[in-house]
Amino acid sequence: MTYADWPLFDLWSRCREVELRPVREADLPELAALEPEDAEPDPRLAMLPGLTDRQNKQRLFHQGYWRALGTWSPQSWVLHLAVRHEGALVGVQTLEGDDFPELRTVDSASWLIPGVRGRGLGVAMRTAALGLAFDHLGALAAITSAALDNQASLGVSRRIGYRDNGLGFVHSREGRLLLRHLRLPADEWTRGAEVEAGGVAPCLPWFGLA
Ligand SMILES: CC(C)(COP(=O)(O)OP(=O)(O)OC[C@H]1O[C@@H](n2cnc3c(N)ncnc32)[C@H](O)[C@@H]1OP(=O)(O)O)[C@@H](O)C(=O)NCCC(=O)NCCS
């Protein structure tokens, strides 16, 4: 059954053994429980006193889902994609755009459960998301950022062809954190043939691409 009023739910993208589909309400309990400790919530979001760190994290995961849907606009969108491998939920690949109709730039974030890391799934899921962005949504560039010691995230970006694009400070719960920024322009994107995607046409107005 398709979801005509919210066609984003019918988007999908695949690269090798990894399939991405938008996170749905029914996925929330499982994904929130799976979210690993090293996937850090936005430090600007308040932790409620009286909840453990883990309860706060799972609460923020739910709120992040509802916030993304409730505040969606072509000028500011966040697409949380559930990552499935061999039929099981194993992570989340997020793609986001600010002023996308004009800037045509996507940012990304992701996590995988520890048990499936280090086997190329991180590259496959980012590739699947970028295939949507570059080959179906007309993105002109992809950007991303990672802590200087996050070798796995930096490794995914470099394997896909992003280049270093400077350093910058951001807030973290531990204080100021130095991030490496990376950028991949559309004319250096070479992995389109690895990606299959569908359900895009009815979503184009959601991205300001009518
Ligand atoms: C980031 C993450 C999604 C990457 O997924 P992954 O499955 O581990 O990555 P891959 O197996 O696809 O590896 C990608 C590249 O990084 C390298 N790499 C992976 N883990 C590494 C590590 N711990 N140290 C050094 N290099 C590493 C791999 O060798 C590979 O490079 P190559 O293709 O040149 O050999 C995953 O590690 C994760 O969930 N980390 C915790 C959350 C996080 O930090 N998210 C990113 C911040 S938004």
Image (cartoon, helix red, strand yellow):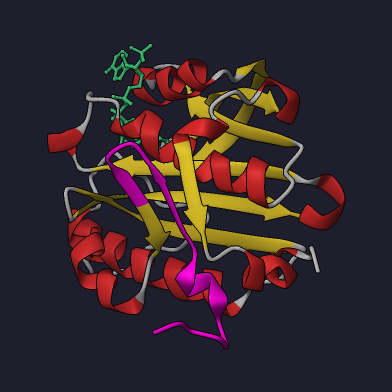
Q: What residue is rendered at 68% in x and 20% in y?
A: 188
Tell whether position 207 is magenta.
Answer: no
Above or below, comparing residue 51 to residue 19 in the picture: below
Q: Is residue 87 visible?
A: yes
Which quadrant of the view contains residue 153? top left
Q: Is residue 52 visible?
A: no
Above or below, comparing residue 40 to residue 188 in the picture: below
Q: Position of residue 177 (x, y in %)?
A: 51, 28
Quarter of the rendering occupied by the N terminus: bottom left
Q: What residue is rendered at 27% in x and 70% in y?
A: 27
Q: Position of residue 70 (x, y in %)?
A: 57, 79
Above or below, comparing residue 86 to residue 171 in the picture: below
Q: Position of residue 127 (x, y in %)?
A: 47, 35
* Ligand 1 shown in quarter: top left
In the orientation shown, which residue stands out farthest toward the right?
A: 102
Which quadrant of the view contains residue 34? bottom left
Quarter of the rendering occupied by the C terminus: bottom right
Tell whether position 5 is magenta.
Answer: yes
Q: What residue is rendered at 40% in x and 52% in y?
A: 41
**Magenta region:** 1-19
Report whether 194 appears left or right of 120.
Answer: right
Camera-nearest residue between 164 and 206: 206
Q: What residue is rendered at 28% in x and 71% in y?
A: 28
Q: Position of residue 122 (x, y in %)?
A: 35, 32
Report whether 196 appears left or right of 161.
Answer: left
Camera-nearest residue between 49 and 204: 204
Report whether 200 appears left or right of 207.
Answer: left
Camera-nearest residue between 195 and 5: 195
